[in-house]
Structures are given as structure tokens and as C-alpha cells.
Image: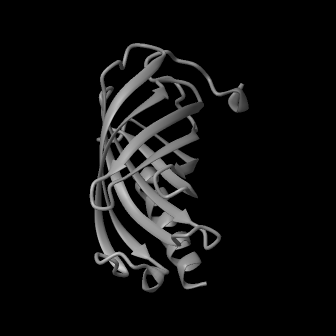
Amino acid sequence: MKYFKKIIFLFAFVLSLGNSQAQVIKEWGVGFAGIWNYTAMTYGADLRAHLILSNRITIAPQLQYYPAFNTYHDFYAGASLHFNFTPSYQWGLYALAHASYHDWINYAESTNSKAQQNNWNAEPGLGIIRNYGCVRPFAEARYNIKWSEGNLRVGLTFFIGDCGGGHHEVCPAYQ
């Protein structure tokens, strides 16, 4: 239950960032993804926000959870910085750098000499996202440097209000 409270608190914080009236955030959306860690053969879920600062730069605060049915029971809280190489195309190809706090819930069961409950991780990666619209599918491939593990993510981000990004599409919910 304590991890569920962490998730709710951190996601509420992320949403409050998106609701801020800061002029630096051009567009924002919230979303989710399924995660497959193909090295450890584990599955998880990702909640995130996409805070678009410019047509090339996005910050994506994220919460990730790998449930107890996996070999590794984990919780992550962090953020990614995305650099979009193709902002004027329908689909954006981006490089990402991710940093996160990692709570390895069942670390005591591991024989790994680096196993401890509290960790910091860095993950470089590549992603693709639809550059405009109210519903923006995305996919990412990342590599966790500390644990030498790769993971794939596929999800959706929902942008409310200005769904344009220069293309001036109107979200169907507002037509």
C-alpha cells in the first residue's frame, strides 16, 4: 500500500506541473505505456506526462512499476529529456536521456552483488511519437546502464485543449 501512495502522490505532482501557467510549456499531455524488459523477461507499466517546451525539446516525468509477479518487483520515479529530430513530420524520431530513482522492492531475494533497495539509474534511448493530434502513440527502446538491461515501451499520450503542434487539429471531444 505504501508504494501505491507514492505512485498517486508523484502522479498528482506531475499533473500539477502540466497545469501550471508557466509560459515555457507549449503543450502538455498525460499518458501510459506497457513495458517489456527483454533482458530480465519482466513486464511493467509506465505513467507519464509530456511537457513540450519547443518543437524539439520535451520533458517527460514518469512513474514505472514492475508488479510482484515478475522476478524483479520495482518502482521507478524519474524524468526523460527528449530531442525530436523530425518535428515537422507526422512522426517524430527522438533521442532520450532518462534519469530515475529506483526502489527495488524485493532486492533481498537477489544474488546480485549490486543489489540494494535504493538506486539511481540512467537510460539513453530512442523513441518515435506522433507529432500532433489529441492521441499520440509512442514507442521507445532504452538501455539501463546500471543493470545492463534493455527495455521496450509502447503507449499513448493524450493532449487536451490545443491538439495542434502547428497542424491545428481539433480534438474530436471539443468539436
Residue 56, percent from left and from top: 30, 28
Q: Quadrant of the C terminus?
A: top right
Task: Using residue 42 as the reference point, say whether residue 173 is left or right of it.
Answer: right
Q: How far across and down, in percent of the image, does residue 102 sit?
A: 38, 70
Specify the farthest residue to the front: 111
User: Which residue appears at 27% of the width and 54% of the height?
Assistant: 145
Identify the image quadrant of residue 118: bottom left
| Nearer to the camera, 86 or 162 | 86
- Asked if residue 60 is positioned above or below residue 67 in the image, the reply reads above
Residue 22 in view of the camera:
no
User: Considering depth in this image, is 10 or 33 the residue closer to the camera?
Assistant: 33
Residue drawn at the location 56% of the way across and 31% of the way down: 136
Depth check, front residue: 122 or 106:
106
Q: Position of residue 106 (x, y in %)?
A: 49, 81
Residue 74 in the image: state x and y as whole percent. 49, 70
Instruction: Look at the image and name its color scheme.
Output: one colour
